[in-house]
């Protein structure tokens, strides 16, 4: 028996050069977004799959478009190929699309409107899958994550207090990869106490040798 695919409610608003689309969906895994003349969205949720696909009113720049996962929604940032006002998001009327009035500006206010609060460092490009179950690293491509972890040499055993790395949700994968690669030299942190003890032993041995030498001179 096949599971019914649910179409989520979405809201949109625009600025001179981009469009912000909020998809009402939460607890998502396996997100896949395709940016093109047609906007395609798919993901899994605890209650079943969610998806939509429709033709956009005008063309967008797929390379500059992205998405990010927030607490109760997925936010899509569509980069317009040509700046200007869009009277609608889809070429045809769809009941699940509505205007986000809290962010909306009229055409005559578009050029002077404030930019959207959208952090590119938290964004993901289109077409990527998002595996669930990794808490703060949600949104990371599993293969990329495996390569990053492999490059760390497995030497972080003494850092048990790091917890679940929770604050890294939605972080740009390239930035995260740079951070992880920079931690490659942290391998032996678990054995710092042993190294300090080993360094102290030669000092104790040297002190004993000096005492023996002084005794020989006295004799």
Image (tube, rainbow, N blue to C red):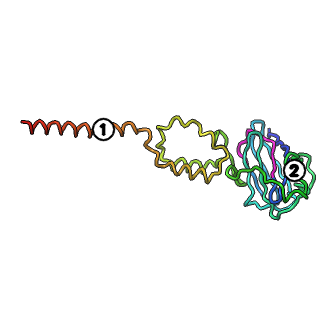
Q: Give the image location of residue 192, x and y in percent.
A: 40, 39
Closer-to-camera residue (43/173): 173
Q: Residue furthest front?
A: 218
Distance from the alpha carbon under mark 1 to that under mark 2: 68 Å
> Is residue 26 found inside the magenta-colored segment of the image?
yes
Residue 104: mark in rendering:
2
Residue at the image position 43 percent from the left and 43 percent from the top: 188
Q: Give the image location of residue 211, x and y in percent.
A: 17, 36
Q: On the image, which quarter does residue 169 sit in? A: top right
| Mark 1, residue position | 200
Residue at the image position 60 percent from the left and 50 percent from the top: 176
Element under label 1?
helix
> Is residue 165 found inside the magenta-colored segment of the image?
no
Residues at circles 1 and 2 in contact by the CB criterion of under 8 Å: no
Element under label 2?
loop
Per the rendered image, the range of residues in magenta is: 20-31
């Amino acid at each position: 028996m096949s599971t019914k695919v649910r179409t989520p409610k979405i809201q949109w608003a625009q600025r001179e050069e981009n469009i912000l689309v909020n998809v009402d969906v939460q607890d998502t895994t396996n997100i896949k977004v395709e940016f093109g003349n047609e906007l395609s969205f798919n993901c899994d949720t605890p209650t079943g799959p969610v998806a939509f696909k429709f033709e956009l009113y005008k063309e967008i720049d797929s390379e500059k478009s992205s998405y990010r996962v927030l607490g109760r929604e997925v936010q899509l940032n569509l980069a317009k190929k040509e700046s200007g006002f869009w009277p609608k998001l889809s070429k045809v009327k769809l009941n699940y699309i509505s205007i986000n009035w809290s962010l909306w500006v009229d055409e005559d206010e578009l050029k002077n409107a404030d930019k959207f609060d959208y952090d590119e460092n938290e964004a993901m490009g289109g077409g990527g899958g998002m595996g669930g179950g990794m808490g703060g690293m949600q949104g990371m491509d599993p293969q990329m994550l495996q390569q990053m972890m492999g490059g760390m040499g497995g030497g972080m055993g003494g850092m048990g207090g790091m917890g679940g790395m929770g604050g890294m949700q939605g972080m740009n994968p390239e930035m995260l990869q740079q951070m992880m690669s920079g931690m490659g030299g942290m391998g032996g942190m678990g054995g710092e106490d042993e190294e300090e003890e080993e360094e102290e032993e030669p000092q104790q041995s040297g002190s004993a040798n000096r005492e023996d030498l002084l005794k020989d001179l006295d004799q």
